[in-house]
Image (spheres, rainbow, N blue to C red):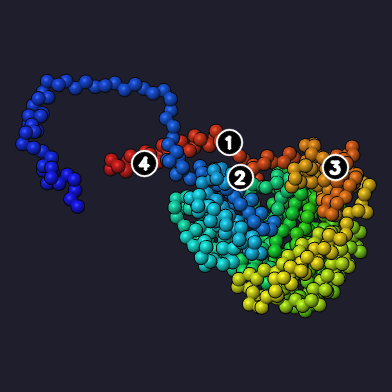
Amino acid sequence: MEAPCNEIIGDIEDLISSQDITPHERYNNRKAIKIRVKKRQRREEVPEIPKSVMSNIPGTQTIYVKTWGCAHNSSDSEYMAGQLAAYGYSLTQEKDKADLWLLNSCTVKNPAEDHFRNEIDSAKRQGKHIVLAGCVPQGAPKASFFQGLSVIGVQQIDRVVEVVEETLKGNTVRLFATKKENGKKSGGASLLLPKVRRNPLIEIIAINTGCLNQCTYCKTKHARGDLGSYPPEEIIARARQAFQEGVVEIWLTSEDTGTYGRDIGTSLPALLWQLVKEIPEGCRLRLGMTNPPYILEHLDEMSKILNHPRVYSFLHVPVQSGSDSVLADMKREYCRDDFKNVVDFLQNRIPGMTIATDIICGFPTETETDFEDTLSLCAEYKFPNLFINQYFPRPGTPAARLPRIPAQDVKQRTKKLTDLFRSYQPYGHKMGEIQDVLVTEISHDKQYYVGHNKYYEQVLVPMDKDYMGKLVKVKIIETSKFSMISQPLDKMVAPGLSKPLAHGQISGVAEMGQASKLPYAIAALVFALLMRFIWLIL
């Protein structure tokens, strides 16, 4: 089909006809025209910086940080958020308003990874810039669902500003390297980096990364690797700084705290004895998870430390199964009696000592007899904190190659163990007790403040702002399966060395308000435009 103008214009020259005036005639007719210079009116107001230009200035965008998984992951997110905020980026919990999503993942179980993948898909649909972190990409760097996206490895979190900045420019950055000192794996990024605590009253300190086990079901080993411990002096310095910033509770975390120091010629008890000297009166320390093999040789010293008035008499020791056969197949490196020895020793030395543990139901080689062994172990100790998990095969692990138990059998075993757990009340005998409770959090239903007594048992107190961050003497007036409700008495102590940082304030860095940031942003813009102008005229 011919173009509609073909019959009128055959070529570009046809746009000028013979009847048109010539250029000479056109300009001759303008000799009498006087050119008058129009004076511009001076504008008083400063022009706004265009959003499109402003958004290209590093450190002016908004970042959403999402975290899955353990306390170690939470600590990593706090450090990444702190560095980004210190550089000038704004942090937000409203992900729809963010320019970039920083997603810190967990690879322990399938559901956590599924949520992570769903969040990536959501970010893509909304056209957000994305940076991935945590154990999922570190443990499987060639996975297809995050190809083309920026990734920051678990030991590279001190380079998060660089990764975010490049990602916002449209580039893809992938950092997976392991940090080493003197040729040996270290704990990771410095503990003295800026951070933004999720809870200004609680400091999470990762004392080491990785572990010494080779558990056949565990994917985390693929991500965190072998043991790498932080020097004691770095941990002590971090704790000291935290208390100076108003923190009242410290959590020590890692993939296995019991292995701390074996790679650098020290031990967990040696570290803890140094730390308790730094804990102010009324503040407390919570020790994170330890596997049975690495705590057995330290039981005597650990019982003394866990009995210290500034240390919670609480320990998370995951047993995973009560069957020696299954434990061997899992390569857990201990037997049922080893675990019982840990529990019996600590509970005999420390009356009221809380032991939390984990169980995996439906490991591929678990028989009904094996499961009954697990059931009897849990019935014997009636653990107040029992974390029950169905077995999930994690890609790349030895156990994933084994034939699976029928799903229905796994569900039945899980239900049977859950019914046992629900059958007893761990706190009923504590009605009427007078306890000292350190209040640090808000309950999930937003109806109470949450505190913990010496045994790290959850105690709810009324939502009076005067109680938050305080050591409060209370009377237990009601108990339930998971907590106790209390009535505060007159005595209340403020244990912190100073007022806690505001929510979102950067630890270890003097904050710069938004108003004071703007001149720097404008100066950076003017400088960029000036350089652009010079480049054009040269």
Q: Residues within 10 Å of mark 4 (few under 14, many from 20)?
A: few
Foreground mark, 1 or 4, reads 1
Where is residue 356? Give x, y as percent: 80, 61
Nearer-N-terminus badge (1/4): 1
In the picture, residue 389 is in which quadrant? bottom right
Residue 207 point in image, percent of width and height: 70, 59
Extreme-left residue of the structure: 18
**Which residue in the protein does label 1 denote?**
513
Report, in whole angstroms, how far the alpha carbon at label 2 lies from the one at label 3.
31 Å
Q: How far apart, in angstroms, are the residues tagged by discs 3 and 1?
A: 34 Å
**Taking 347 as reference, is 388 left or right?**
left
Q: Is residue 59 left or right of residue 436?
A: left
Q: Nearer the viewer, mark 3 or mark 1?
A: 3
Q: Residue at x 66, y 78 (%)?
A: 402
Element on which disc 1 rests:
loop
- Point 67% across, 58% down: residue: 69
Query: Measured from the top left, where is residue 247 in percent x and y?
Result: 74, 45
